[in-house]
Structure formats: structure tokens, C-alpha cells
Amino acid sequence: MPMFVVSPDVVDRSWTDWVNVPERYGLNKEINLEGVHETVQNLRQFKANSQKAFGHVAYMPEYAQVLQETHTKVLFNVRDPRDIVVSEYMNALRKFDAGDKMPMWNYYDKEDGKYLFEKEDPITELIIFATARWPRWLGWLEHDFVKKVKYEDLRLNTKETVIEICDWLEGFGCPDIDTIVRNALPKRDNPTFRRGVPGEWKDTFKLHHMKLADELLSGIIETLGYE
């Protein structure tokens, strides 16, 4: 987002990525059809009024259709799901230390009467969440107007990845390469940035986490191009 100076933010109102989360968390189990319509209109509006937009937008066929109609190219930024789990876990701990007792994903489990981060093993729960949510995003990979961009490539091979992206965009919306590379440097005041280290899960996961991720996430990991 900061690399290409992207704004504004598109908010996905469908709730589609939560419908498969275990029922014990009491989350919504149905897609919000009114929210889908609202998001479609927002996607069309942003195309009409802005060259670029950013958003955490899960896959819906309706979203793909409007982007095809408006001839929009999509950069689908992905990251190893195991590292995302670690990032979510560590960011929650950081917020707890800062006095925030309700960090993201700290939902209430009605079966054991505990919030997610009150449990003895939150990482296991976050792996289960990832297993439920990722399939609701993978549909983007089926379209030729979408380019998958790995977070790890942006961090480790920034200039080469930026050149590849700008070639695919045919230069549209791209400032000069050196500016994009400078914009890619982590901003320490970014509230969501912590370390951004690829492969951190290998140092954080215990053996049972690795086995669970292999059991539940292996297909998703392979689809995204990880090992």
C-alpha cells in the first residue's frame, strides 16, 4: 500500500471469510448479501474516482465481475499463512502489554468460556482460523487480471519484484522504481508492522503446531506457492 501510494481503502462488507470459522465462536455463519452489494458499488466507485485503491477484500464472484467490467488489474498480496499466524499472535501479545485486552481475533469460545487469547494455546486456534478463512480468498488466483505478489518477495527481493509488477501493470500507477523501493522500507510507526521476518513460524511453532499446520493448511500453502 505505501509502496504505490495507494488510497482510499475498500472495506469488504460480505463477511464471507468468517462463515467457516468454528461455530463455538458464535460468529456470523451467513454471507451478508447487502454487504456484498455495498462492496460491489464501492469497488465500482473507486474505479470511477481513483486510479488505485487498497483493501482486504475476500473473493466473491460478484467482486470479480465488477473488476472485470471496469478493466481493473489486481495485485493480490499473499504471505505464508504460518507467518501470518505468528504475526497475529505476536501483535496480540504486544497489544495486551500495552493494555488493550481485546486485540483482533480475540473472540469468545462459548464451549470453554474463554476468549481466544485467554487459552493456553492461542496459536492452535489461529491455525484453525486460517484454515477456515483462506479458502474464501483463493478464488482471486483463478483470474488473469490478478497477479499474485508474495510478501516475502517484496521484503527480500524488493527491486526485482517491483520491476516485475510495473511491467505487468504496463507502468500504470507506478512512480519511478527507486521511489517505490524507498516506500517499501518498513515504517516503525506503522501500527501493524512488527518484524516482517519471512519464515518466523519455524522459530515460533512447536512440533504440534507444525503437525497441525501440515494437516490443515498444506493444500493452501501449496496453492499459494510455499513449501
Image (spheres, rainbow, N blue to C red):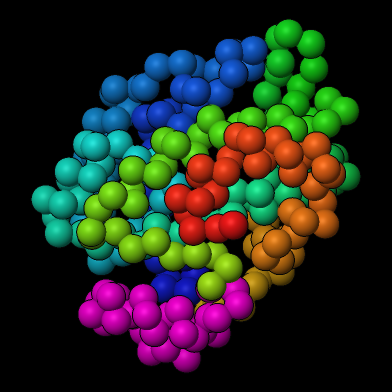
Residue 55 is situated, as x and y percent measured from the top left of the image, at 41, 51
Give x and y (percent) for residue 28.
Answer: 49, 17
Residue 183 higher or lower than 112, as above or below: below
Residue 1 in the figure: left or right of residue 113: left
| Number of dots carrying numbers | 0
Foreground residue, 141 or 31? 141
Please state if 207 lies on the left or on the right of 74 as rendered.
right
Indicate left or right for 48 with 190 as reference. left
| x 40%, y 66%: residue | 6
Residue in the foreground of this view, choosing between 222 and 141: 222
For residue 102, say whether it is visible. Answer: no
- The residue sitting at 60% across, 34% down in the picture is 216
Residue 143 visible in image: yes
* Most frequent secondary structure within the magenta stretch: helix
Q: Quadrant of residue 61?
A: top left
Please, is residue 128 above or below residue 79 in the view?
above
Residue drawn where x is 36% and y is 76% of the image? 165
Name the side, left or right, on which 68 lies relative to 156. left
Residue drawn 23% across the image and 59% down it: 144
Q: Quadrant of the C terminus?
A: bottom right
Residue at the extreme left: 69
Residue 156 on the magenta segment: yes
Residue 43 in magenta stretch: no
Whether 20 is drawn above or below 76: the answer is above
The x, y position of residue 119, in whole percent, is: 83, 25
Q: Position of residue 122 (x, y in %)?
A: 78, 33
Along the line of sight, the residue nearer the viewer: 199 or 120: 199
Q: Quadrant of residue 75?
A: bottom left
| Magenta-drawn segment | 154-182
